[in-house]
Image: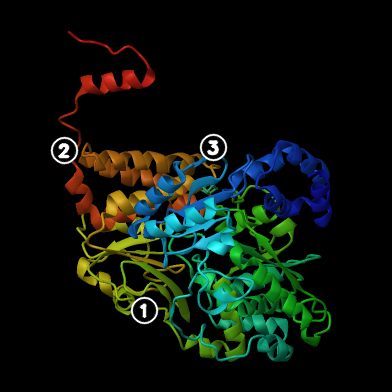
Amino acid sequence: MDNKLSNILKRYNNAPDRLMDMLHDIHNLQGYITPAEMEVIAGATGKSFAEVQETVTFYHFFSTKPKARYNIYLDSSITACMRNRKTVKEAFEHECGIEFGSVSEDGLFGLFNTACIGMNDQGPAAIINDIVFTNLTPFRVKELVKGMREGLPVADLVYENYGDGNNSDPDVKAMVVNNIRKKSVLLKRDYEFFSVIKDSLKNFSPDEIVKTVEDSNLRGRGGAGFPTGMKWRFGKRVDAEHRIIICNADEGEPGTFKDRVLLTEYPEQVFEGMVVAAYATGADLGVLYLRYEYKYLLKFLNRKLEEMREQQLLGKNIAGINDFNFDIRIQLGAGAYVCGEESALLESLEGKRGEPRDKPPFPVEKGYLNYPTIVNNVETFATVVKIVKNGADWYCNFGTKDSRGTKLLSVSGDCQYPGIYEVEWGTTIREVLEMSGAYNVQAVQVGGPSGMLIGTKDTDNLNKQEQMKWYKPSGMMGAEKFLDRKLSYSDLPTGGSIIIFNRERDLLSDVVMNFTDFFIEESCGSCSTCRIMPTVLKKKLQKILDGHGVRSDIDDLINWGKVLKASRCGLGQTAGNPILSSIINFRHLYEQKVKSLADYDTDFDLEKAIQASSRFVGRKPVVHI
Ligand code: SF4
């Protein structure tokens, strides 16, 4: 390994900010990273051993110990659970002879749970040695494990009828399908890829491009909704030797898979949008940060970049424009939801733990390696191309006054046609349910676990003031209005995740618990609120679900949930949302579970509780005579 390691270090010029790449390369060779290797890397990059170690141990897909020959990561998202994940999990355990969270003694199999892998429209799904397997059933598991026992390469276990479109590309060969159900202005193939770089850019000054994007009122499509043109203007006005454009393809919000489809079918448009942004802002380096779960697209995306270089659409004097020099590289993440937060992404890009930074300064002032950095979502870049091609006025014809244009929705859960829908902002929940063939609907999760759970039954037990405090500016509506709520920045903003639950689903035990577990698992641990409170909330919720709750427990959940709002980043600030929004819209479910509407448990058995706690801490139980 010594020679190989020094080659890896040489490949990245010992640059500390390429630590993630070095770790990936070592992982690709042997599947784990030893302390000795961390020492060598530390010495070469000028980092301390502790700094290298904390990066290695932060990410889900890095390991410090040998793993198995076949490492099976089974998606634990709620949509997978709704499609019989439990039986698939049991089948893996039965066939491999081990439990999840362990490696078999012979080192053949490793079974691991993993958060949403962006396959909600075709789950349950698993990643086995970086290859995605969708629509798993116990029968399919049996076949897979048999193949692995026979020593077959994992790629040979994918059915040969690969998915549609570029999923069948020789550099992808994935059984993933796109499930594009509705196309509008973004997805329609009504322009030739790269024609904006080749033909349009030279007709506009950089300032005019920024102005066009500002006039279009395009807002970031990742969920936060910050005006894109304004972000570009802020990034442009800082004097610096380099300026950076980053495409955030760390699509980790459970229930979201639109970027997967864009990167599969429209990578040219996404990269073209990055080039447009570079031209407009004077950037010279671009990075697409790709979530690890989409590693199966890496070779294909790199090929697309190479093709762009061959056509002089990247590199020096792009499209014949003097001094327009810009190139893009792809940075692979390693499994951390928090890296979807732009400053955490920058930390990761610099080879560190993905811990969000304090702001200010904002990335547009001091971002990657302290250079002004513009971070936009995959969908945002793809949209920019259409705006520059057709003009801001054209784009403003779509959507609503405060929410211009269209939005890609990733629809999954209890509906006949899960997949990608491009709809105009202002589309109602009723329309989304109708177009996706939803049935017997009880609730809809809009915006993933960090968004809100809305539904057909609203007991209105929280007063209006309390509701407004948490979900400004929408407030909460009566049950009859639920279907007429609109996807827009003034009512239901969303990064795109829409999960539908029918009336058979147990919203509290299954849905809210799954989302709360997700936040517990994904906290970076930096803030005490985010590190501790989701677990405390979960325990309180469990108490209620176990039938030991009282009315004041519901109030505790609300009050303690507020504490989370003091967390540093969006992950912690929204970690209480599954519980809070379900209390607001489904309070009756909580009240049905509490033993008494009194403020304390009248049946509390002190003696029994003391005995239990004595047993827990290993003390001799106190016996009262
Ligand atoms: Fe980390 Fe959570 Fe704090 Fe965000 S809120 S910085 S994820 S601990």
The residue identified by callout 1 is 427
x and y percent of residue 547 in the render? Answer: 21, 39
Give the amino acid at mark 2. Answer: Ala
- Mark 2 falls on what kind of element? loop
Which of the colour schemes (rainbow, by chain, secondary structure, one colour) is used?
rainbow
x and y percent of residue 355 in the render? Answer: 60, 48
Asked if residue 137 can be seen in this view, the reply is no
| Quarter containing the C terminus | top left
Can you tell me whether the CB of the residue at mark 3 lies under 8 Å from the nearest atom of ligand 1? Answer: no
Residue 592 against residue 35 in the figure, above or below: below
Left or right: 538 as drawn, with respect to 73:
left
Q: Distance between the residues labelled 2 and 3?
A: 53 Å
Asked if residue 121 can be seen in this view, the reply is yes
Residue 35 against residue 273 in the figure, above or below: above
Q: Residue at x 38, y 72 (%)?
A: 418
Can you tell me whether the CB of the residue at mark 1 lies under 8 Å from the nearest atom of ligand 1? Answer: no
Give the amino acid at mark 1. Answer: Thr
Nearer to the camera, 338 or 216: 338
Sequence-first tag of 2 and 3: 3
The residue identified by callout 3 is 105
Residues at discs 2 and 3 in contact (Cβ within 8 Å): no
Q: Residue at x 48, y 57 (%)?
A: 144
Answer with the quarter of the image where residue 189 lies: bottom right
- Mark 1 falls on what kind of element? loop
Nearer to the camera, 610 or 163: 163
The residue identified by callout 2 is 598
Give the amino acid at mark 3. Answer: Glu
x and y percent of residue 224 in the render? Answer: 50, 65
Q: How many numbered marks have been drawn onto this rendered protein structure? A: 3
